[in-house]
Image: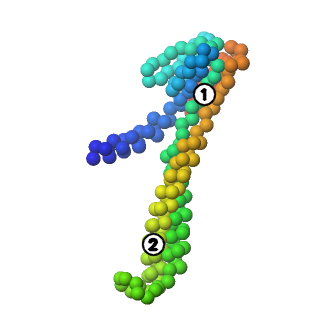
């Protein structure tokens, strides 16, 4: 029971946690500062923060700023499952609607219409479920590999250009 509650909590809080914009800052020394939020410019320094606190980075030493795009496994899985389920229902109904009575069946005798309705319903459930699983898996994989980062190369820019670029990134972040 506790595992189920924990799983439900994770499922409902994960999307809210992923709404945060995460950046990665690369310095001319080769150091990489990951999982930060861009806060503000303070003179010629960029103030960034993460769960551990905030720090100030000399803009002159920044060679790259990267907006880290989160992968969207669950979004892809949901879309894939819906497409798979719809396709499976259509296939199941089509097969079921073409069912014909045969002699020697086990169970109560059904007239042709009842047989077709029952077969269409069962076909929709079976094929819909099976293709929802397949579609969800494929959609999840596609969603997981579709996250592409936005990279801002500042390595060849003068200080003024770096400041202007960072200011535009800060404004962009405010508008989200």
Q: Residue at x 39, y 40 (%)?
A: 10
N-terminal of the two: label 1 or label 2? 1
Q: Residue at x 41, y 39 (%)?
A: 13
Residue lying furthest front = 104
Q: Reply above or below: 174 against 30.
A: below
* The disc label shown at residue 32, or none: none
As rendered, which of 103 and 59 lies closer to the eye?
103
The residue wearing badge 2 is 121
Percent position of residue 15, x then y: 46, 40
Dot 2: few (<14), some (14–19), or many (≥20) neighbours within 10 Å?
A: some
* The disc label shown at residue 66, or none: 1
Percent position of residue 125, x then y: 45, 67
Residue 85 seen in render: no
Mark 1, secondary structure of its residue: strand
Tell me the quarter of the image containing the C terminus: top right
Percent position of residue 114, x then y: 44, 82
Q: Residue at x 45, y 81 (%)?
A: 115
Q: Residue at x 54, y 73 (%)?
A: 94
Q: Reply above or below: 109 against 82.
A: below
Mark 2, secondary structure of its residue: helix
Q: Reply above or below: 166 against 85.
A: above
As rendered, which of 129 and 54 lies closer to the eye?
129
Give the Cα separation between the discs numbered 1 and 2. 51 Å
């Amino acid at each position: 029971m506790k595992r189920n509650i924990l799983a439900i909590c994770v499922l409902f809080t994960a999307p809210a946690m992923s709404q945060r914009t995460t950046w990665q800052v690369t310095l001319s020394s080769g150091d990489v500062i990951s999982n930060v939020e861009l806060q503000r410019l303070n003179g010629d320094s960029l103030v960034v923060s993460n769960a551990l606190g905030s720090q100030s980075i000399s803009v002159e030493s920044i060679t790259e700023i990267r907006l880290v795009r989160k992968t969207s496994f669950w979004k892809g899985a949901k879309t894939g499952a819906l497409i798979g389920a719809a396709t499976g229902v259509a296939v199941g109904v089509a097969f079921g609607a073409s069912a014909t009575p045969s002699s020697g069946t086990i169970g109560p005798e059904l007239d042709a219409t009842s047989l077709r309705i029952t077969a269409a319903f069962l076909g929709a459930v079976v094929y819909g479920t099976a293709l929802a699983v397949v579609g969800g898996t494929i959609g999840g994989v596609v969603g997981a590999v579709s996250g592409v980062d936005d990279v801002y190369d500042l390595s060849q820019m003068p200080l003024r250009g770096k400041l202007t670029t960072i200011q535009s990134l800060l404004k962009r972040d405010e508008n989200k």
